[in-house]
C-alpha cells in the first residue's frame, strides 16, 4: 500500500514540476521579477530553471535515475528558496498576478520545506538508505 501511495505522490510531484517548468516560459517575466535586479540575465535564468524543472521531473519518473534526481531536486529547491524569500520581502506578486497578497507570500515560504520532504519521501526507493 505504501509503495502505491509513494508512486502516486511521485507522479503528482513530477506533474507539478513539469507544470511549474512550463509556467517559467509562459510567465517568464513574472518569475524574473522574483529575482533581484542585480542578478544578470534574469529571464535567461528563468528559462534555464524551467528546463531544469522539466528535466528533473522526467528523471524522477525513471527508476534508474530516480535516486540522483531526488537528490538534485531537493538541492534545486533549496537553491531557489532565496528567490521566494526576496519576493516575500519585496512584496512581489506571484507570476500572472497583478497584486501581491503579503500574507500568502509569507505562507508560501512554509511550503518549500514541504516540497523538499515530498520529493525525498515520494522518490525514495527500497534500497535507498539516505538521500
Image (cartoon, rainbow, N blue to C red):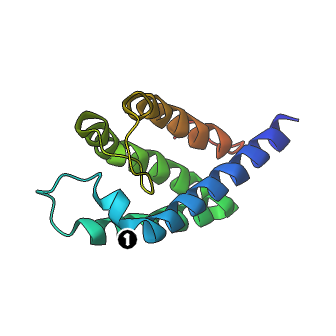
Query: Can residue 65 be seen in the rendering of this structure?
Result: no
- Nearer the observer, 9 or 60: 9
41 vs 63: above or below: below
Dividing the picture into quadrants, the one containing residue 45 is bottom left
- Nearer the observer, 89 or 20: 89
Horizontally, residue 51 falls left or right of residue 48, namely right
Image location (x, y in percent) of residue 33: 28, 56
Q: Which residue is mark 1?
A: 47
Horizontally, residue 75 falls left or right of residue 130, namely left
Image location (x, y in percent) of residue 121: 63, 37
Q: Residue at x 48, y 51 (%)?
A: 73
Q: Residue furthest front?
A: 98
Image location (x, y in percent) of residue 2: 82, 34
Q: Residue at x 45, y 34 (%)?
A: 108
- Nearer the observer, 100 or 112: 100
Q: SS of the residue at dot 1?
A: helix
Image location (x, y in percent) of residue 39: 15, 59
User: How many discs mark residues in the rendered view?
Assistant: 1
28 vs 73: above or below: below
Image quadrant where one finds the N terminus: top right
Horizontally, residue 95 falls left or right of residue 117, namely left
Amino acid at each position: 500500500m505504501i509503495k502505491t501511495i509513494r508512486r502516486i505522490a511521485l507522479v503528482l510531484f513530477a506533474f507539478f514540476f513539469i507544470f511549474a517548468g512550463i509556467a517559467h516560459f509562459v510567465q517568464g517575466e513574472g518569475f524574473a521579477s522574483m529575482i533581484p535586479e542585480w542578478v544578470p540575465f534574469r529571464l535567461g535564468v528563468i528559462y534555464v530553471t524551467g528546463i531544469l524543472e522539466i528535466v528533473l521531473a522526467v528523471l524522477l519518473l525513471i527508476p534508474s535515475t530516480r535516486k540522483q534526481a531526488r537528490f538534485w531536486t531537493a538541492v534545486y529547491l533549496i537553491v531557489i528558496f532565496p528567490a521566494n524569500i526576496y519576493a516575500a520581502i519585496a512584496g512581489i506578486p506571484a507570476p500572472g498576478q497583478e497584486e501581491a497578497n503579503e500574507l500568502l507570500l509569507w505562507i508560501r515560504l512554509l511550503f518549500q520545506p514541504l516540497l523538499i520532504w515530498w520529493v525525498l519521501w515520494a522518490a525514495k526507493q527500497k534500497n535507498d538508505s539516505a538521500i
